[in-house]
Image: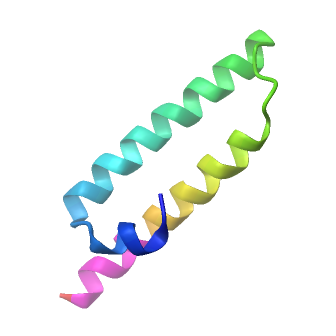
Amino acid sequence: MELKDLRKQSAQDLNEQLIELRREQFNLRMQKGAGQQTQTHHFKRVRREIAQVKTLLGQKPAAK
């Protein structure tokens, strides 16, 4: 998801997005452990999106 779209979301929506990204990251780790994961670029994408969401969550309370 693009950063400008994430900025428009509320803190609750961002928390839900973060939970979903953590689930996806866990599933990718399990696939890697089982030898099923061949597309390693997904790890980087999920890590980056988690960082973006956490950064925005840190900025939301400061803005209020």
Q: Tell me which residue sits at (54%, 57%) in the image.
A: 49
Q: Nearer the viewer, residue 28 or 3?
A: 3
Is 63 placed above or below 8 here? below
Magenta: main secondary structure equals helix
Q: Residue furthest bottom?
A: 63
Q: Is residue 35 above or below residue 40?
A: above
Q: Quadrant of the C terminus?
A: bottom left
Q: Which residues are magenta?
A: 56-63
Indicate whether residue 57 is drawn in magenta.
Answer: yes
Q: What residue is at 28 percent from the left and 73 percent from the top? A: 8
Quick check: 12 left or right of 38? left
In the image, residue 60 sits, relative to residue 62, either above or below, namely above
Residue 35 placement: quadrant: top right
Image x and y of residue 54, in percent: 45, 64
Residue 3 rendering spot, x and y as whole percentages: 47, 71
45 and 15: which is toward the camera? 45
Q: Which residue is depicted at the point 52% across and 55% down?
A: 50
Point out residue 4 in the picture as x, y percentages from the top left corner.
Answer: 41, 75
Is 39 left, or right, of 20 in this rendering?
right
Is residue 8 shown above or below 15? below
Can you tell which quarter of the image residue 29 is in?
top right
